[in-house]
Amino acid sequence: MKDGQTKIGSDVRLVRAAQDELIENGGHMEMLAVAKRAGVSVGLAYHHFGSKTGLRVAVVDAFYAPLREILFGDEIPVDQDWITREKTRAAAFIDHFYDHPFAPLIAGRLGREPEVCDIETAHMDALLAKGARNLAQGQRQGVVSADIVPELVIGLLMGGLRQAIDTAVLTDQRPDRTLLLEQVWRFFERGMGLQQDQTKQGVEHAKLG
């Protein structure tokens, strides 16, 4: 066992090792290879996760954990105006996919497998529910159009965001993340019916920041 491994739980080491195996092998892994990389017995790997599928699901869940923090936690400052805060949130979402080495597999091959789709659906349902509440808050503040139905529009916005990100991370030459954010935000502005004066204030706030 390598130095420092004993300080990290065997379940965490297995998830990290599985992620590395999946990345190196184009979405494939074997429990024995994962256990060896993690410095534990293959029996312990099965004890923690039950099966190769269970371990793969744990890797996907770990990928989504920072996204939950972006949406539900303290990752995004709450003292910003609504538009600046939500654009910052969209930027953080893009950054996670651009910076995480596992993202191309989520966007591509693994994203089509049933067990991965199930865990993604559970995460996206939570993201959509929170997103709808954010839109409703924007309506109460007079920033988002009162004509939209938050529960419907958030699906269009998040679906468009995710599709744009997936396309970007799978291309040989990724577009600049700032360009991607600006393109996505234009789509968001129209979808949310943002009030023009509020949009300009948000842009000026972002420049000053």
Image (cartoon, helix red, strand yellow):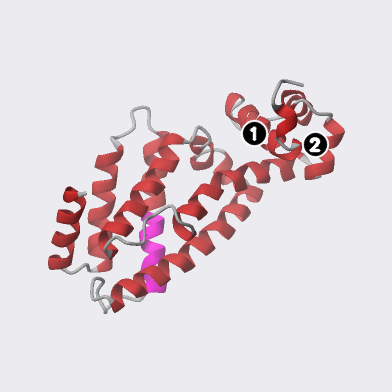
Judge left or right: residue 98 versus residue 51: left
Q: Position of residue 200 (x, y in %)?
A: 13, 60
Q: Which image quadrant is residue 94 in?
A: top left
Question: Which of the pair 181/190 is nearer the observer?
Answer: 181
Numbered circle sitting on residue 45: 2
Circle 1: element type: helix
Q: Residue at x 62, y 33 (%)?
A: 19
Q: Residue at x 26, y 79 (%)?
A: 146
User: Measured along the vertical axis of the image, is residue 64 above or below residue 153?
Assistant: above
Residue 16: image tag: 1
Residue at horizontal 27 percent and vertical 67 percent from the top: 192
| Secondary structure mostly taken by the magenta-highlighted segment of the chain | helix
Mark 1–mark 2 Cα distance, whole angstroms, equals 12 Å
Looking at this view, name the residue that lies furthest to the right: 43
Amino acid carrying mark 1 in the image: Arg
- Please state the horizontal and vertical placement of residue 49, each as a whole percent of the image: 77, 44
- Badge 2 marks a residue whose secondary structure is helix
| Kind of residue at disc 2 | Ala
Where the N terminus falls, by quadrant?
top right
178 is within the stretch colored magenta: no
Does 196 sit left or right of 74 as displayed? left
Say whether disc 1 or disc 2 marks the residue closer to the N-terminus: 1
Q: Position of residue 147 (x, y in %)?
A: 27, 79
Relative to 14, residue 185 above or below: below
Q: Position of residue 109 (x, y in %)?
A: 55, 38
Left or right placement of residue 70 versus residue 145 in this view? right
The magenta region covers 150-160
